[in-house]
Image (spheres, rainbow, N blue to C red):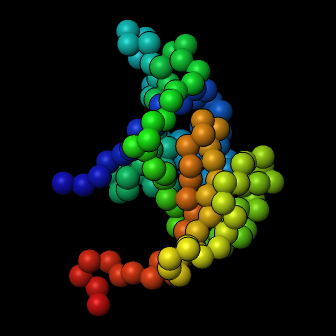
Amino acid sequence: MRLLHTMLRVGDLDRSIDFYTRVLGMKLLRRKDYPGGKFTLAFVGYDTEDKAAVLELTYNWGVAEYERGTGYGHIALEVDDIHGAVDAAAAQGCKVLRPAGPMSHGTTVIAFIEDPDGYPIEFIQKGTAGWTRAGED
């Protein structure tokens, strides 16, 4: 098994595609309308779907906003330069939820921005996670 994608419901598909491609540097991998179901799917990511997990952006025609609920957390992206990533996002009008800095209870350097639908996006500074992957010592 492998993780294929995570789906987010969005209120304006073109606005969301613009955010994920222009602001976060992902590529639009595919997009398809489903007139019978009155929805459109767009898949964005940093690599092709056969090589990496991607985001599925689902636009239900005529639905401009969703409640996110309390179970959703965030999307996390590793970045080479967290301060530069936050500054670049802010310069493009993104809301910064938390400026770059170490976690309260650790050494991992993180920051949070918000996508156009209010979903939090966490930036994690490469090399600061303070943990090892399973199987590494």
Q: Measured from the top left, where is residue 95 in percent x and y?
A: 72, 48
42 up-or-down from 20: above or below: above
Left or right? Give the position of 1 relative to 20: left
Question: Quadrant of residue 36 in the image?
Answer: top left
Q: Nearer the viewer, residue 105 or 57?
A: 105
Residue 5 visible in the snapshot? yes
Q: Is residue 98 left or right of residue 53?
A: right
Coordinates of residue 33 in the picture (x, y in percent) = 46, 20
Q: Position of residue 52 (x, y in %)?
A: 38, 56
| Residue extending farthest right | 91
- How many numbered badges does the structure rendering display? 0
Residue 37 falls in image quadrant: top left
Residue in the picture at 61% in, 58% down: 112
Q: Residue furthest left?
A: 1
Looking at the picture, tell me which residue is in the foreground, 86 or 101.
101
Query: Where does the N terminus fall, quadrant-wise?
Result: bottom left
- State the residue at coordinates (76%, 54%): 90
Is residue 127 positioned above or below 122 on the image?
below
Can residue 57 be seen by looking at this rendering? no
In the rendered image, residue 86, in percent from the top left (x then y), is placed at: 70, 62
Q: Which residue is the extreme one toward the top?
A: 36
Location of residue 64 (image quadrant): top right
**What residue lies at 76% left-to-right and 62% top-to-bottom?**
87
Relative vertical location of residue 120 with respect to residue 82 in this rendering, above or below = above
Q: Quadrant of the C terminus?
A: bottom left
Query: What residue sits 49% from the left and 59% below the top?
Result: 76
